[in-house]
Amino acid sequence: MSSRSLETGGMADDMEYRRSNRTVFGYCLVVALGAMLFGIDQGETTGFLAMPKLLPLKFLKDFGYYDDNLGAYNMTAQRQTLLYGATLGCTVIACIISGPIGARYGRRAGLALCALTSIVGPSIQAGAKNVPAMVVGRAIAGFGIGFAANFVITYWSEATPVELRGLIVVMYQGFINLAQFIGAAINEGTHGMTTRWAYRAPLLTELPAPLLMLAFLPFIPHTPRWFVSRGRIDEGHDALRTLRGNTFPEEEIEKELREIAAFDEIERELEASSSFFDCFKGTDHRRTRIVIMVLVCQQFTGISFITAYGTYFFTLSGINNAFVITVITSVCGIAGSALAFPIIKYFGRRPILIVGAAVSAISMMTFAIVGVAAPNSTAAAKCLVAFTCLNSYANLGTKVGFIFGGCTILTFFWTLFFLPETKGRTLEQIDEMFLNKVPTLKFKDYVCTGHAGHLSVEDQLEKMEMKGVVTEMIEHVGTRN
């Protein structure tokens, strides 16, 4: 495996690498529009429930009921769950079907589905006048979110060189936070309106991002790894050349393509007698466990509660400028994402996750302790009322902070002992380390040799020479020169 896999340098000078990075960064910015879909939806819909209940033509009147006891419009917890559950349920379905869609039709096709569903969903919601129509719109939007979560990061991971991959992938959360800020700011500007446009206008502002992405998708290449996985080496070379730029050295393109093709052959041999259930066996079980736990741990922090019910919670707590507070929390999210860029570049993935888990645990525990220690104070009472009104949290009041805090403590220790560091590694090197069962704490210093289990890159290249695959690659290079 080439030293280029580990660091920039090799046969191309720094200027060519910088030009290459700018090229791939431009393509990744187009795909980044998909990351904004989830953020702007969350940033806006969390505020709809908190819009003033006494104004007649708002979200709560159209989709809730008039509560005689409150003398205002309200929405049952069951209906809230239905509206948000429709989105989450379809997000899960989209995640499940994204695998076969991406494998057969490519990541770009998945991104197109993401854009289309993200156009149709908000459009239906903006025109909805009853709960069934709104549920359908929320469900379709959920498909867009699920497709974005799968195809955006996959495209970035497969398209970017190793030295850029960490910085590019962290942009996913950064763009989500930016979009949440935009959504919260739009809500701040429209929540005082006395017509349905108070929530319709924000919904329609969700459309520019997917429309732009759909318009630019034909101009970005498929990923070379997808072409290679389909046996289309010639097109894989062209895609890699497009991503790296016209001035990038041909020998580096060929070297990277050979590495991709060799590991694709290794994966094919390992998958020849495998099935879906093998994801939970052997070395693949470890990968599956890590992928699932990283996502589960994110939810352990309580972030979904903050983003989904933040504005509503602030309103019920008696805060007059709840929408402004939501905007401020969104700005904090952007600041956190911005800090992640240098941290990931210089320190890796593990430190940011370990520190993040520790800070989240302290925050949630502090919130819970304050509520329990001063149960009769006005502030604590308001917090308790807010949580009690959310039936989905079983009337735990501020004690829900102990649940999220406890889960985040578990997240801290799991990250410390089970999450490996992948800074500066190509996807092929990560494959090698998992196949060789490298311990978590040794990932950082492990020296890759190109041997994965009983297989090696050199062996695969020899087999590929015999099959004519490498010859095809070389002939293609010759015709271009």
Image: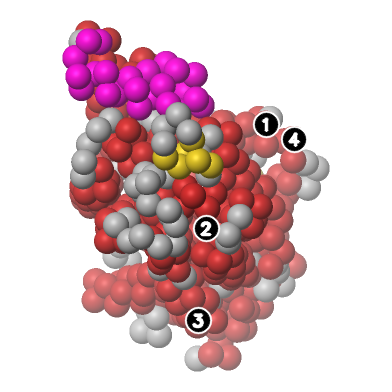
Q: Which residue is mark 4?
A: 277
Quadrant for residue 381, please give it: top left
Secondary-structure class at tag 4: helix
Earlier along the polypeptide chain: callout 4 or callout 2?
Answer: 2
Question: As displayed, is residue 389 above or below residue 251?
Answer: above
Structural distance between the alpha carbons of marks 3 and 4:
38 Å
Dot 1 or dot 2, earlier in sequence: 2
Instruction: Please name the residue that numbered disc 3 is placed on.
Output: 215
Q: Position of residue 223 (x, y in %)?
A: 54, 68
Question: Which segment did they paint magenta?
Answer: 375-397
Q: Residue at x 62, y 36 (%)?
A: 284
Q: CA distance from mark 4 to mark 1?
A: 6 Å
Question: Dot 3: few (<14), some (14–19), or many (≥20) neighbours within 10 Å?
Answer: few
**Residue 78: in magenta span:** no
Residue type (three-letter) at the residue carrying disc 3 = Ala
Among the two numbered marks 2 and 3 on one chain, the one whose residue lies closer to the N terminus: 2
Instruction: Say which element carries label 1.
Output: helix
